[in-house]
Amino acid sequence: MVGFVAAIVFLIIEKNTTVRWNAIQSLLLGLGTFVLDLVLGMTVVLALLIPIVNIASLIVSLVLAVKAYQGSTVRLPLLGEWADKVSKKV
């Protein structure tokens, strides 16, 4: 939840395009994780994978945050393209 709020705040108040792009990618990662959790939660067997998905998402988010703090941009394979499209519209 904190990741969503922080990304939205950076998206709203920040004028730097790199920071905004990273915020959009973070929002897309969080949204993808949320949707995947919902889909996996529909069955009892797949629901056991939800903690693994959330831990993996947390690790990816932390790596992306550290890289963004260091000034470099990491493009996730599918989300990077979507972040490009969304950042042009925002």
Image (tube, rainbow, N blue to C red):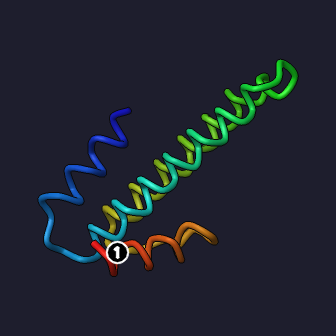
Query: Quarter-wise, where is residue 78 in the image?
Result: bottom right
Residue at figure coordinates x 65%, y 34% from the top left: 37
Residue beneath disc 1: 87
Q: Which class describes the residues within 10 Å of circle 1: few (<14), some (14-19), or many (20+)?
A: some
| Quadrant of image for the N terminus | top left
Q: Nearer the viewer, residue 11 or 18?
A: 11
Q: Is residue 8 above or below residue 43?
A: below
- Rendering coords of residue 22 (x, y %): 36, 65
Q: Is residue 68 above or below residue 49?
A: below
Q: Report the number of discs.
A: 1
Q: Is residue 14 above or below residue 58?
A: below
Q: Is residue 26 above or below residue 4?
A: below
Left or right placement of residue 42 versus residue 36 in this view: right
- Rendering coords of residue 16 (x, y %): 18, 74
Query: Quarter-wise, where is residue 48 in the image?
Result: top right
Query: Quarter-wise, where is residue 42 in the image?
Result: top right
Left or right placement of residue 49 versus residue 54 in this view: right
Kind of residue at disc 1: Ser
Q: Secondary structure at mark 1?
A: helix
Residue projecting furthest to the top: 44
Residue projecting furthest to the right: 45
